[in-house]
Image (spheres, rainbow, N blue to C red):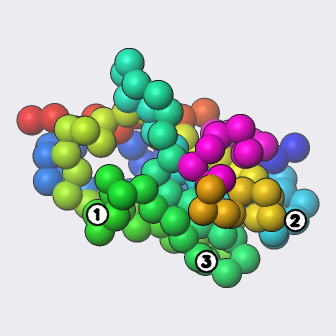
């Protein structure tokens, strides 16, 4: 059974930084992609970023380009989301999710939650002064 566990959330002032981690365990294949999603109160879940585990290619939502960086460490099966210059609109619960590369890692699919198979429990990120 695949499990994903997020960590690294918390509170930060506007302009600050946080790094989220997502540890993946139980995967029987390396051909997967990890997506980061977030959901703010009263809003729909949105895709933030996605990375291919095999070759490190990435996608980003326009709202985070230039501020967020997704990366992965294949030796520890960990995916990171470095978030810089955070603003109050970045507040929300952040989730990582896994899907097969073939199914998920396409420009028209990576931000769509139903294409992913496994999800983490989510972690709170709060940006406020």
Q: Is residue 19 visible?
A: yes
Of callouts 1 and 3, the N-terminal one: 3
Q: Residue furthest bottom?
A: 55
* Mark 2 and mark 1 residues within 8 Å of each other at the beta carbon: no
Q: Which residues are magenta?
A: 109-120
**Residue 88 position in % (x across, y down):** 20, 38
* Mark 1 and mark 3 residues within 8 Å of each other at the beta carbon: no
Which of labels 2 and 1 is toward the front? 1
Q: Is residue 23 visible?
A: no
Q: Secondary structure at mark 2?
A: loop
Towards the viewer: 95 or 103: 103
Which of labels 2 and 3 is toward the front? 3
- Which residue occupies 47% across, 28% down? 44
* Marks 2/3: CA–CA distance: 15 Å
**Residue 109 position in % (x across, y down):** 65, 53
- The residue beneath circle 1 is 67
On the picture, is 94 further left or further right than 119?
left
Of callouts 2 and 1, the N-terminal one: 2
- Which residue occupies 42% across, 56% down? 61
Q: Secondary structure at mark 3?
A: loop
Of callouts 2 and 3, the N-terminal one: 2
- Residue 56 is marked as 3
Q: Residues within 10 Å of mark 2 (few under 14, many from 20)?
A: few
* Marks 1/3: CA–CA distance: 18 Å
- Residue 29 is marked as 2
* Above-or-below relation of 122 to 78: above
């Amino acid at each position: 059974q695949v499990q994903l566990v997020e960590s690294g959330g918390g509170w930060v002032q506007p302009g600050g930084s946080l790094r989220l981690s997502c540890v993946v365990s139980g995967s029987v294949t390396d051909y997967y992609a990890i997506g980061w999603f977030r959901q703010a109160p009263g809003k729909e879940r949105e895709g933030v970023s996605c990375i291919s585990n095999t070759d490190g290619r990435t996608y980003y939502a326009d709202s985070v380009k230039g501020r967020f960086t997704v990366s992965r460490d294949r030796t520890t099966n960990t995916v990171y989301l470095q978030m810089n210059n955070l603003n109050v609109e970045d507040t929300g619960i952040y989730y990582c999710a896994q899907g097969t590369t073939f199914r998920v890692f396409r420009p028209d699919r990576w931000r769509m939650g139903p294409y992913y198979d496994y999800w983490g429990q989510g972690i709170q990120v709060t940006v406020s002064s």
